[in-house]
Image (cartoon, rainbow, N blue to C red):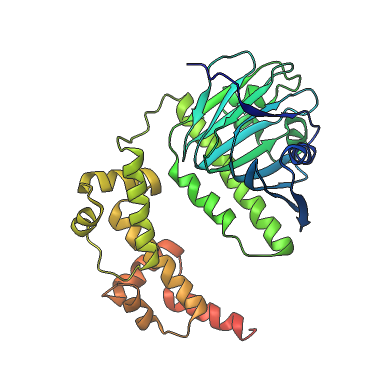
Amino acid sequence: MPYFEIYMIEVKINAKSTEEGIRQMQNYFGGDITEKWGEYTLEFDNNIGKGCIKFITFDWGVSLVEFNAVFFEDILFINTVEDFNPIHFSYCSKGYFEHRFSNQSEYKTVEQYHASIIVSRMGLDHYTLISNGVEIELNNIRVVRQEFLKKRLNNIEQLNQKLHEVFVDNRDENEFAYFSPIHLKMEDHIKALKEMESEGMTRILQIEGEVYQLLSMHIARHDRYQQNEVLPITLLKTELKVIKQQSQTIINDPALNYSLEQLSKDSGLSQAKLQEGFKFMYGRTVTEYIRHIRLQAARELMNNSDLNISQIVYSIGFTSRSYFSKIFKEKYNITPHEFKKQIVATLEGV
């Protein structure tokens, strides 16, 4: 059913850049814009809504907008594309939003943990609806095609045919919209962006790296769609959330004696569903995932503690040092002893 657009605030955006678009939003939402290390943040707290909108623009035609807010009225963003028409790669971490083009009557909903790739054509506006009371966390990567295509080594010719057509449409003649199914792996990179504590140039480079990773994941998911691959998942969204909680438990305490049977009892999911979920989300079985997390924890302890290798082995849940050494070398192509020696040599300035 079409959404009757009454009793809502219309936010009309006609900008030539991401920065200008955010400043136009400020005219509606109020608040202040601050800048640090090239990142801009609009914060507002009033009778319209409460939250913040962060953005950063890179010199290769890409900008990142992070939207974290709740509104007390329905908000309808109306974006024209006369002077600025990037491709929008979006991912919804919390809540949901709805989108349609101005020549459509039906909205498409992008729910929590879902993604979309959307671009308009000249003369066709974006209508994006955020309902009142919905806590929305949205990651939006905007790619300006003409600038992006000038970037060296972008390998645009390797895109699938449909996305290639979208990227090389420099006359803005065609609209495009792809709505991806649930994609929980992407949430890990969104979380890394949110929790980033580095500063200055290091921070900017790390953000840029995560943006590259997220773009590649958007494109890879669309490739699978174009190839008519059926995503191997029969789990409900609520069940996937439970699996993500179980994976976080393993990360928080890798030394526990986990078993598939006990994880099944703790989660309320069958062992088959656990295996399916872990394979879908992390590309590993439950056992492989536990081993992967323990090896990461071991490497972290070697870097940041005075524990010897035997102490580390038993502190992360392994019972055999020889087995640990074998799988560590398989994963990192170096023995634990050699890895530890490299760390010591670095610290001593050798």
Q: Is residue 247 left or right of residue 87?
A: left
Give percent across and percent down for residue 348. 61, 86
Can residue 342 be seen in this snapshot?
yes
The image quadrant that residue 345 belongs to is: bottom right
**Image position of 15 (left or right of 340):** right
Q: Position of residue 221 (x, y in %)?
A: 49, 34
Percent across and percent down for residue 166 are 65, 24
Above-or-below relation of 237 to 38: above
Of 144 and 94, the residue lying toward us: 94
In the displayed structure, 110 sits above or below 175; it is: below
Instruction: Count how many numbered circles sit on residues in the image.
Output: 0
Q: Tell which of 288 and 37 is nearer to you.
A: 37
Residue visible at 64% across and 57% down in the picture: 206
Residue in view at x 35 percent, y 73 percent: 316
* Rendered position, 319 above or below 97: below
The quarter of the rendered structure image containing the C terminus is bottom right
